[in-house]
């Protein structure tokens, strides 16, 4: 579970996203960061029950920095208003896809669980599409599975209007081959975050997502 004080820190940071306020409240940031990292360590242990390669990870391998890179951004706010962690084989910097968890009580994306590939570069996207094209029956079984659909929806935010060149118009997975991101996601509310049983809920969601993660990661394992 996540402490209310951690959520309050993120809400306050959104209203005061400047270095002066942050330095004045650094102790609150350190407490919130520690709380989130402790939660991520618990989460890793829970997810590793279904996915043993995760067992050697620690929160420091997965949690993203709160400091924003503003060099090429119109938004010059110095801090992210969320805590996020990418739990996957090799940690957050690895090429594999995996489980992403973010808490942001007030923001565009909010608090959510997700997994998969977000806007992969063109060479990787081509390999993913090829894997789906050749193994479409398996892919469709995974995302149409009742347990998967109970936990997740496959995001359709990034999708081509037409099929990629070379894909037959009547391909059984044609609609999915238009996707430019392959992300399973579900939103989370503050009440769930503060529930002592939330780790169990995350564990169940990850187990439902794992067949999709394993399918997508074949494009890396085959290299």
Image: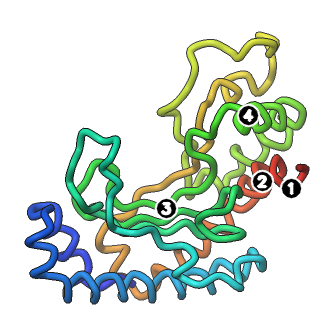
Sequence-earlier tag: 4 or 3: 3
Q: Position of residue 160 (x, y in %)?
A: 58, 20
The answer to which quarter of the image holds residue 154 is: top right
Q: Which mark is residue 123?
A: 4
Q: Which mark is residue 17?
A: none
Question: What separation in Å lies between label 4 and label 3 (alpha carbons)?
Answer: 26 Å
Question: What separation in Å lies between label 4 and label 2 (alpha carbons)?
Answer: 14 Å
Is there CB contact under 8 Å for labels 4 and 3? Answer: no
Q: Which residue is mark 2?
A: 217
What residue appears at the point 55 percent right and 73 percent down from the top-left corner?
62
Question: What separation in Å lies between label 3 and label 2 (alpha carbons)?
Answer: 18 Å
- Give the quadrant of the N terminus: bottom left
Q: Of discs 4 and 2, which sits in the foreground?
A: 4
What residue appears at the point 26 percent right and 62 percent down from the top-left corner?
79
Q: Circle 3 — which element?
A: strand
Q: Circle 2 — which element?
A: helix
What residue appears at the point 89 percent right and 49 percent down from the top-left corner?
223
Sequence-earlier tag: 4 or 2: 4
Q: Circle 4 — which element?
A: helix
Residue 163 lies left or right of residue 41; in this view the side is: right
Q: Which residue is mark 1?
A: 221
Q: Which mark is residue 113?
A: 3
Question: What separation in Å lies between label 4 and label 1 (alpha carbons)?
Answer: 15 Å
* Viewer-nearest residue: 145 or 35: 35
């Amino acid at each position: 579970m996540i402490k209310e004080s951690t959520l309050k820190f993120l809400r306050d940071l959104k209203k005061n996203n400047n270095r002066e306020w942050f330095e004045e409240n650094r102790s609150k940031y350190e407490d919130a960061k520690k709380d989130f990292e402790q939660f991520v360590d618990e989460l890793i242990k829970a997810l590793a029950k279904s996915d043993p390669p995760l067992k050697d990870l620690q929160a420091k391998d997965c949690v993203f920095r709160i400091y924003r890179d503003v060099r090429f951004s119109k938004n010059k706010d110095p801090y992210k208003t969320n805590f996020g962690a990418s739990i996957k084989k090799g940690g957050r910097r690895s090429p594999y896809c995996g489980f992403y968890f973010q808490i942001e009580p007030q923001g565009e994306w909010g608090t959510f669980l997700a997994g998969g590939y977000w806007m992969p570069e063109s060479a990787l996207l081509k390999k993913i599409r090829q894997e789906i094209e050749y193994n479409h029956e398996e892919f469709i079984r995974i995302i149409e599975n009742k347990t998967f659909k109970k936990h997740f929806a496959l995001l359709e935010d990034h999708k081509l209007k037409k099929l990629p060149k070379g894909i037959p118009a009547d391909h059984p997975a044609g609609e999915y081959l238009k996707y430019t991101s392959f992300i399973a996601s579900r939103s989370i509310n503050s009440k769930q975050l503060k529930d002592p049983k939330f780790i169990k809920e995350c564990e169940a969601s990850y187990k439902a997502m794992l067949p999709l993660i394993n399918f997508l990661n074949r494009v890396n394992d085959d290299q």
